[in-house]
Image (cartoon, rainbow, N blue to C red):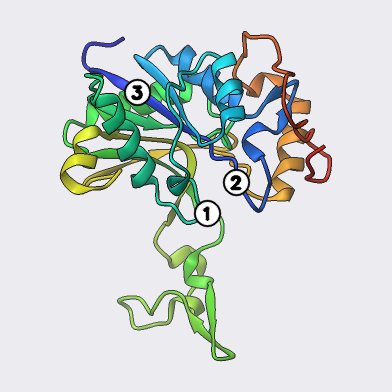
Amino acid sequence: MNATIGQAIALIPARSGSKRVPNKNILKLNGHPLIAYSIAAALEAGLFSTVFVSTESQEYAEIAKHYGAEVSFLRPKEFALDLSPDIDWVKFTLSKLASDKRLFDHFSILRPTSPLRTAQTIKRAYSEFVGSGNADSLRAVELCKQHPAKMWKIVDGQLVPLMVRGDSGIDWFSSPTQSLPEVWVQNASIEIAHVRCVNEFQSITGKVILPFKTEFPEGFDVNRQEDIEILQSLVTKTPSLLPKVNQKPFWNLTRTPMVFGDKCRVA
C-alpha cells in the first residue's frame, strides 16, 4: 500500500431488500454475481488493508466471502431498510471494527451496482484524493445530460421550475442550454472520505468534497430494469470492461439469481 494513503478500508454495501430491481446486488452477469466485480476491483487495486462487505443477509455474506471479501459480522436490519441513510451503516461498521482495535484513516464506498468501475478507476480516484491535500472526501460525478434548469415539479396540478432564474433575470428554463452553467450529477462508482468525517461531522462527506470526474461507462449504475439490458449489451460487446474475477463462480445459492436480460424474478 502507498504510504501516503495510510490505512484504508473498502466498504461494499449490499443489502438484500432492493425493491426496484430485487436482489440486484447478486444478479448474475457473465457467470458471477454482480457484487463479485466490485470485490475483484477493490482487491486488484491493492490500496486497501481490508475489503469489507456490509450486508444484513447471511446468503450475501457467504457469496462475498467466496469472492475474497471480509464479512466478520452482519449489518443490523434497522440499518438495511429502504430509507436507511449511508451514515448509519458506515458508522456502525467502522465502530464495530474499531472496538477490535482495527482503525483506518480513510474509507471508500464501492457500490456493487457499478460493476464497470475498475481497479484503475479506484487508483485514479485515490491519487486525486491524496493529492488534493485539503479535501474531506471525494465523490464520483459525471456531466449531467439533462440540465436541471429545464426540469419541473408538478405542484397542485401546476408546473413549478426546479431552479429559479439566473443572475441575468432571465428564467433559466427559457435560456439556451449553452448559456447555463455546467452541472454534474453524482454516480455510484466510488466515494472516498476520511474516517474523521464520520466522527466529527456525523457525515460520510465532511465539508470539502472533491469532484472525481468519470466517463461512461465506468460510472454506469444498475438502478432500473432498463439498466440491466444496457449493461448486458455493453459487456457482451466488450467483456474486458468488467474487472477480472479470479474465483470460480459461486453457484451454491439458496435462491437462483436472475440472469441479465430476464425479467426480474427469483427462482
In the rendered view, would you say 88 is above or below 130?
A: below
**For the residue marked with disc 3, what is the amino acid?**
Ile
Check residue 82 in the rendering and tell me which mark sits there, or answer none. Answer: 1
Q: Residue at x 35, y 46 (%)?
A: 88
Check residue 185 in the rendering and tell me which mark sits there, or answer none. Answer: none
Q: Quadrant of residue 181?
A: bottom left
Which marked residue is nearer to the observer: mark 3 or mark 1?
Answer: 1
Q: Are marks 1 and 2 in contact (CB under 8 Å)?
A: yes
Quarter of the picture containing the C terminus is: top right
Left or right of 41 on screen, residue 88 = left
Q: Are marks 3 and 1 in contact (CB under 8 Å)?
A: no
Dot 3 lies on which element? strand
Dot 2 lies on which element? loop
Q: Earlier in the sequence, mark 2 or mark 3?
A: 3
Q: Residue at x 15, y 43 (%)?
A: 200
Quick one: 42 or 62, which is closer to the camera? 62
Question: To which residue does mark 3 refer?
Answer: 9
Q: Earlier in the sequence, mark 3 or mark 1?
A: 3
**For the residue marked with disc 2, what is the amino acid?**
Gly
Question: To which residue does mark 2 refer?
Answer: 17
- Image coords of residue 264 (percent x, y): 78, 45
